[in-house]
Amino acid sequence: EPSEPRYEVVTSAANTPFEEVAWYNDGWKSYREGYHKWRLLLIWTGAAMLFMSLPALNLINLNLSRILERASEIGVRKAFGASSHSLVVQFAVENLLLTLIGGVLGFALSYLVLYTLAQGFNDFQFSFGMGLRVFALGLLATVFFGVFSGGYPAWRMSRLQPAQALRGGK
């Protein structure tokens, strides 16, 4: 209710969750002036990168074991003259395709979940929608980690000698 009877409506701007964290934590009172904005953004970015590095390391291990199973194929290809570059590109492209398929499936499932939620909350004044910018950034991060997690193990295996690769890459 407005405190003054001559006003019918009070308009205010809500803070984003990011601003709320910065505003209500002790020592961050000058956030409104922009002094701590970049420091907080750096902390959140660092935390996100640490959070994403664990699945990336898991993907590297999975891809390394997948490539080790194909060590004899790598040995045969190297024996017939395949360059290390072509082997790395082959495994990176394979992993990129798998990553893109997973990203498209994730997008489709997210859309279905949001559509289902929107049907259940028709009576409320908020709406659910798909943020294409967020999806594009997420897909970009997924592609980066997918190519990195497929390219690094392939690069390690491509450096083996053909005889060593034929023995299983040990």
Image (spheres, rainbow, N blue to C red):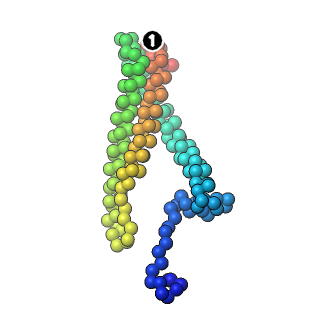
The residue drawn where x is 58% and y is 50% is: 38
Q: Is residue 76 above or below residue 55?
A: above
Residue under numbered circle 1: 163
Q: Count numbered badges in the picture.
A: 1
Q: On screen, 93 above or below 30?
A: above
- Please name whichever residue, 162 or 96, is drawn nearer the observer in this view of the structure: 96
Residue type marked 1 = Ala
Most foreground residue, 78 or 2: 2
Identify the residue at image location x=32%, y=59%: 115
Residue 167 appears in the picture as rendered:
no
- Residue 126 or residue 78, whichever sits in front: 126
Where's residue 86, x and y in %?
38, 20
Q: Determine the residue positioned at 56% across, 43% down.
A: 50
Residue beneath the point at 47% across and 28% down: 152
Q: Is residue 110 above or below residue 99?
A: below
Where disc 1 sits, the SS reads helix
Q: Is residue 127 left or right of residue 46?
A: left
In percent of width and height, residue 26 lies at 67, 61
